[in-house]
Amino acid sequence: MAFVVGTQNPNLVEVNFIIASAEMPLATLLSLCLFTGILVGLLFNFLSLIRLKQKNGQLHKANNLLLTKNQSQS
């Protein structure tokens, strides 16, 4: 698919950044945007997964405390 997009879009485009600009083929720009988006998405998912694992550990500890408290009262 990338090959098809690259061959159909050989035009050079100018990209203006905050402090610089660059000229590159449109297919290269699209590929960079795609891979940057994938990396950012993976990073946010990874951070969310870490937070969920920490919360899960806290809930397991609280559950175990409640279970041992319940068993000692019985």
Image (cartoon, helix red, strand yellow):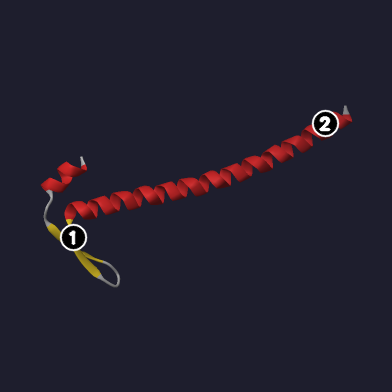
Q: Mark 2 Cα within 10 Å, few/some/many (few <14, many 20+)? A: few
Location of mark 1 (residue): 24
x, y (%) of residue 18?
A: 30, 70
C-alpha span from label 1 to label 2? 67 Å
Task: Indicate left or right for 44 with 33 as reference.
Answer: right
Instruction: Report whether 30 appears left or right of 72.
Output: left
> In terms of sequence position, does the residue under pointer 1 or pointer 2 come before the other?
1
Going by the numbered disc 2, the residue's amino acid type is Asn
Q: In the visual, does 23 lie left or right of 42? A: left
Quarter of the image that includes the C terminus: top right
The residue lying furthest to the right in this view is: 73
Residue, x 72% and y 40% (percent of image)? 61
Depth check: give the residue in front, 72 or 14.
Answer: 14
| Residue located 68% across and 40% down the image | 59
Q: Which residue is the extreme one toward the front?
A: 3
Q: For mark 1, give the secondary structure.
A: strand
How packed is label 1: few (under 14 Cα within 10 Å), some, or many (20 or more)? few
Query: Which residue is label 2 attached to?
Result: 70
